[in-house]
Image (cartoon, rainbow, N blue to C red):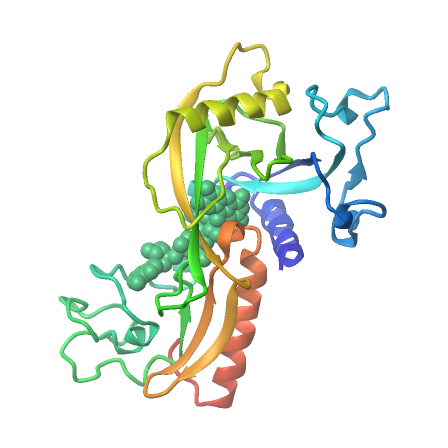
């Protein structure tokens, strides 16, 4: 799915270099304690990436050098992409609407995906005025039921109580500086040091923590300082000739993590209809997005072809 997404990102970037919010740049990986899967030969998935090469710290080329603290023992680089989510998501939304998609904003949370079948949609797919306030949708006479051929449950955490779902808290920091590469360092103590340049004047995300099942919404200043200094130690080039990074804000987010991996599968819910689940993408929702989307389309088409043509 990541490779399918890579191909889509390449095509989108080529067709819309100034508006899609996608930047192609160097990806650099540094490992302090590489597991056997990383050691000779490097994993096929990595090896096949465009621009892949192992870094050789004994080379005189400065782009091969490892962080000066001497703890990194394995490194590689490859060509990859990053997005500025604000620009990219707005770009996707414009395309969706331009192609006839409609956006309905509910003033409540759905409790189960089945509720989406019962939303009182009018003929053009928009919500009937005043609808959406009651559980089960509207006036309870089933308006909309039967018009919807499939519901895609792309709710991040799944909506349906799923015992395998949890969250992974992530604290990161947005800084104003650009960076010429997206750098990821896996530290021997299990912590991570990374940067994700947003491009399009969006600054760079410096991260980050990965805390399973921690729901604390507040960022910690000490954690921010640790993340920034560890990143500067790893990739001092981000500073250019500045003495320090310019903090814009701290970010705390929750990655929708699922034990056993994402749930991407169809289910016929008795009394409701076909639900295509696509949730639990953890910290890789963007990286896997187009691969997941292809699987969703395949699942929905397979179902719809088996039944009468109805409104999606
Ligand atoms: C700190 C951090 C770092 C990350 N880094 C990366 C990274 O480097 N690469 C990467 O690919 N990803 C990264 N992610 C993960 C990425 O943000 C998620 O994987 C991605 O947002 C998941 O997308 P999604 O569309 O599946 O779910 P979401 O983005 O969670 O969207 C789900 C939508 O469903 C709606 N919804 C949910 N429940 C209900 C309900 N009951 N009723 C109505 N609406 C509902 C929500 O409001 C939301 O709009 C990171 C996340 C964090 C927090």
Q: How many marks?
A: 0
Q: Position of residue 106 (x, y in %)?
A: 24, 61
| Position above or below: 299 against 225 | below
Residue 55 placement, left or right of 145: right
In the image, what residue occupies the spot 53% across and 71% down?
297
Q: Position of residue 130 (x, y in %)?
A: 13, 66
Q: Is residue 92 visible?
A: no
In the image, what residue occupies the spot 85% across and 46% down?
40
Q: Position of residue 180 (x, y in %)?
A: 63, 27
**Residue 179's image quarter?**
top right
In the image, what residue occupies the spot 25% across and 74% down?
119
In the image, what residue occupies the spot 57% across and 16% down?
239
**Residue 107's image quarter?**
bottom left
Q: Position of residue 201 (x, y in %)?
A: 47, 29
Residue 228 placement, left or right of 143: right
Q: Nearer the viewer, residue 152 or 71?
A: 71
Q: Nearer the viewer, residue 71 or 90?
A: 71
Rendered-image quadrant of the N terminus: bottom right
Rendered-image quadrant of the C terminus: bottom left
| Position above or below: 67 against 242 | below
Q: Is residue 174 visible?
A: yes
| Position above or below: 154 against 274 | above
């Amino acid at each position: 799915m990541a490779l399918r997404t890579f191909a889509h990102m390449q095509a989108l970037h080529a067709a819309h270099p100034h508006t899609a919010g996608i930047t192609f740049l160097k990806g650099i990986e540094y490992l302090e304690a590489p597991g056997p899967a990383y050691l000779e030969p490097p994993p096929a998935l990595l090896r096949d990436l465009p621009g892949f090469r192992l870094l050789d710290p004994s080379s005189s080329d400065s782009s091969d050098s490892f962080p000066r603290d001497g703890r990194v023992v394995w490194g590689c680089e490859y060509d990859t992409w990053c997005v500025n989510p604000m620009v990219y998501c707005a770009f996707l939304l414009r395309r969706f609407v331009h192609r006839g998609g409609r956006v309905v904003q509910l003033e409540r949370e759905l409790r189960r995906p089945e509720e989406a079948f019962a939303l009182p949609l009018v003929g053009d797919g928009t919500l009937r005025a005043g609808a959406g306030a009651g559980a089960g949708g509207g006036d309870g006479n089933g308006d909309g039921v039967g018009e919807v051929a499939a519901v895609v449950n792309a709710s991040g955490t799944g909506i349906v109580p799923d015992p395998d779902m949890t969250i992974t808290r992530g604290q990161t920091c947005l800084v104003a500086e650009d960076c010429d590469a997206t750098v990821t360092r896996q530290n021997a103590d299990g912590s991570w040091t990374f940067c994700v340049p947003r491009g399009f004047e969006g600054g760079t995300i410096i991260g980050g923590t990965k805390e399973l099942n921690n729901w604390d919404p507040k960022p910690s200043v000490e954690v921010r300082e640790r993340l920034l200094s560890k990143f500067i130690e790893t990739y001092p080039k981000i500073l250019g000739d500045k003495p320090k990074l310019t903090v814009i804000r701290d970010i705390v987010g929750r990655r929708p993590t699922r034990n056993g991996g994402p749930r991407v599968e169809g289910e016929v819910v008795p009394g409701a209809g076909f639900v295509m689940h696509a949730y639990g993408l953890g910290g890789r929702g963007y990286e896997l997005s187009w691969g997941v989307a292809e699987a969703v389309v395949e699942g929905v088409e397979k179902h719809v072809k088996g039944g009468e043509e109805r409104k999606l």
